[in-house]
Image (cartoon, helix red, strand yellow):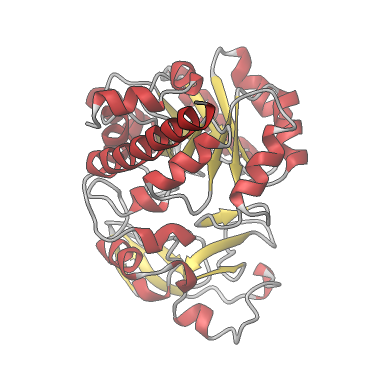
Amino acid sequence: MPDSKLAASLRTPLCDLLGCDVPILLAGMGGVSRWELAAAVANAGGYGMLGMVRESPALITEEVTALKAATDRPFAVNVIPAATEPRLLEAQIACCLDLGVPAFTFFWDVMPEVVARVKRAGCLVLHQVGTVEAARIAEDAGADVIIAQGVEAGGHVHGRSPVFALTQAILNAVKVPVVATGGLASGADLASALAMGAAGIQCGTAFLATDESFAHPYHKTRVVEATGSDTVLTDVFVLNWPKGAAVRVIANSVTGALGGAYLGHDPDTLPREAIAWDDDQPRLRFSTDSPLRTTTGGLEAMALYAGTGAGRIGSVVPAAERIATMVAEAGKILVGLESEDREGVA
């Protein structure tokens, strides 16, 4: 657990809204943010999210049940309406509501009717966006929190603006709390976000490289070894998602073969070739699947998601240790800034 005095110094109104101690959110990474990681983040004072994009109601039930058994802290479930078949999406939401899920995180195109549906059920809505326009639409639809995703983010990236420039623009455009995300992996990043008026930060890569994440050890090792410049933004890993959906990954043999032509790939023209497996489920080259604990096969050629903050991740540690380190660093920076401000006034 983070130092209680430092944690208290970082507390923002977002913490009261979400029921967490520190304004550090776990990104709802599909496949990676399972119950063990969400519980570890929540129990360490952060805000946990389950990454359930396109997962079955049966798996959602298992994950939510296990998470509730592991923590009494609030949490959210991440689903992506625009990238999910409508009948499955309806089944996912109905399942979550039946299970008493208190909050949802949505991403990609804003679908106001979906936001309204879960708001009527009394749930909080956090909506991740990549543009100011999308932030306004999400707020108008009823979102309680806007997550401003910069182009530095690992995984799927919707916008093309740097994280702090986008965060500032969205802060100027909406009234609800704004969380910054994208390449943020340290206490210094948290301090910078809070100093500019953001309500907190959301981290993906920093939590992917933890003991509790469901990512394959190979993926975690590649994150630890990578620098921000080792990541590329590409839409070649697009099978299972809409055309043009770009992702940030660690460069590998697939991206190396593109000759620098990272964008502009049509999923309809890409071959369907199984290179790895999760039990009896094939994982295709060029798919959005990343290697999980259960994956076997050609892991190197899969989508190895990571943000530009990977260069600040030097080891795989428990999630609680990562949060405590971030809180300690951010707290010291912000205390120093407050001291400078007082001296300036004097």
Q: Position of residue 2 (x, y in %)?
A: 25, 32
Q: Is residue 232 visible from the viewing direction of this image? A: yes
Q: Position of residue 309 (x, y in %)?
A: 44, 58
Instruction: Left or right? Give the position of 217 relative to 76.
Output: left
Question: What residue is rendered at 65% in x and 52% in y?
Answer: 158
Question: What residue is rendered at 34% in x and 60% in y?
Answer: 280
Residue 102's place in the image compared with 10, above or below, is above
Nearer the observer, 153 or 309: 309
Q: Residue placed farthest to the front in the image?
A: 346
Nearer the observer, 291 or 322: 322
Residue 225's place in the image compared with 309, above or below, is below
Residue 165's place in the image compared with 267, above or below, is above
Q: Position of residue 165 (x, y in %)?
A: 66, 48
Q: Quadrant of the N terminus?
A: top left
Nearer the observer, 213 or 289: 213
Q: Is residue 58 visible from the viewing direction of this image? A: no
Instruction: Left or right? Give the position of 115 relative to 200.
Output: right
Question: What residue is rendered at 40% in x and 28% in y?
Answer: 10
Q: Position of residue 241 (x, y in %)?
A: 61, 56
Q: Report how many numbered discs are placed on residues in the image.
A: 0
Nearer the observer, 255 or 279: 255
Quadrant in which residue 327 is drawn: top left
